[in-house]
Amino acid sequence: MAKLLEDLGFHDKELSILLTSDQAIAELNKTYLGRQGPTNVIAFPMEDQAHGGRPISPMLGDIVVSVDTAIKEADQTGENVIEAIDRLLIHGLLHLSGYDHERSEAEARRMRAQEERLMALIKEE
């Protein structure tokens, strides 16, 4: 993740990552987003601006991934589970970076292109 954070310009930023179950992510989805059922990934940005615009925390945010859903998606896409989890972590990171595929089809295409670019970047390792 450090390589991805660096690439996106988040120098000295930290992430909290939680790998969890469909049941647990469904509870978070309902509580914080008002949506029913499990989802693959949820990103929670941290407020990091104090008075005067100075950063108060190195935390970029939290990314929660359902491993259960990642396994199902891996079966559907032909990815292995690690690749599916990496893709979901990248998706969450892009949400924390301000991308939102629900805004418009153009934004969804832009986000997909970034996901593919970042997946290629981590495969270089």
Image (cartoon, rainbow, N blue to C red):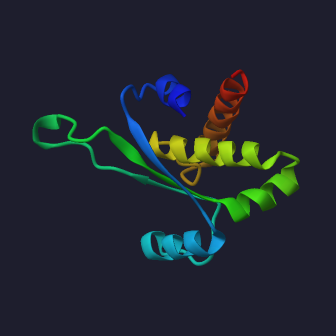
In the rendered image, the vertical position of residue 32 relative to residue 113, given as above or below: below
Give percent across and percent down for residue 10. Answer: 41, 29
Where's residue 84, x and y in %? 73, 48
Quadrant of the image containing the C terminus: top right
Report the front residue among 53 and 16. Answer: 16
Viewer-closest of 98 and 77: 77
Please determine whether, in this image, residue 29 is positioned above or below residue 78: below
Q: Tell me what residue is drawn at x 26 percent, y 43 percent.
A: 48
Vertical side of 51 occupied by 20: above or below: below
Q: In this view, does 59 lie above or below 2?
A: below
Could you tell whether 113 is left or right of 27 in the image?
A: right
Residue at the image position 22 percent from the left and 42 percent from the top? 49
Question: Nearest the camera: 39 or 84?
Answer: 84
In the rendering, at what x and y percent does residue 13 appear?
37, 34
Residue 78 place in picture, x, y as percent: 88, 47
| Residue shown at 40% from the left, 48% from the top | 61
Count of residue discs = 0
Q: In which quarter of the image is the N terminus?
A: top right
> Which residue is found at the position 72% from the left and 27% from the top?
120
